Amino acid sequence: QVRLVESGGGLVQPGGSLRLSCAASMTIFGINARAWYRQAPGKQRELVAIISRNGSTKYSDSVKGRFTISRDRATDTVYLQMNSLKSEDTAVYYCSAAYDPDSEPDYWGQGTQVTVSS
């Protein structure tokens, strides 16, 4: 069974950086999009960044210019580099994988907590 495992979350001060990683337990054939979502307490889950099979990327307006999604094809690992972190970035971050990039993901990670606080 496919598992996505996130790592790299933690506590960071405002203005700091973190890099999240998402490793797949096995190669998932046919996946066309890998993405990062986040959910803050009392808020709906939101799409943060997505990378397609051809390498194109999209970001939510709230993180554009600060976050970068990337992928290591050799290890099938996806990363989210987060710079200039703000308190409003505090959330549980989930990685995902989807066969159809326009549909709900087919696979989810368990989530990793990111807390931005002084």
Image: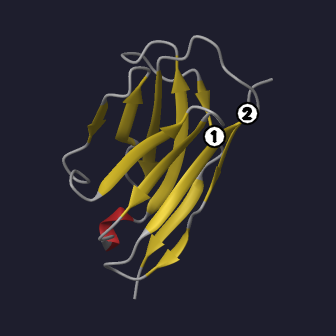
Residue extending furthest toward the front:
74
Question: Which amino acid does the dot numbered 1 rest on?
Answer: Gly
Label 1: which secondary element = loop
What numbered label is drawn on residue 109?
1
In the figure, is residue 46 to the left or right of 27?
left
Residue 51 locus on image (x, y percent)? 39, 31
Asked if residue 72 is positioned above or below residue 118 in the image, the reply reads above
Q: Residue 3 carries which label?
A: 2
Q: Residue furthest bottom?
A: 118
Q: Please state if 104 lies on the left or on the right of 68 as rendered.
A: right
Residue shown at 31%/78% (left/top)? 15
Residue 17 is tagged as: none
Q: Where is residue 81 in the image (x, y as percent from the top left)?
A: 42, 57
Residue 20 place in picture, x, y as percent: 53, 56
Residue extending farthest right: 1
In terms of depth relative to the viewer, which is nearer, 42 or 103?
103
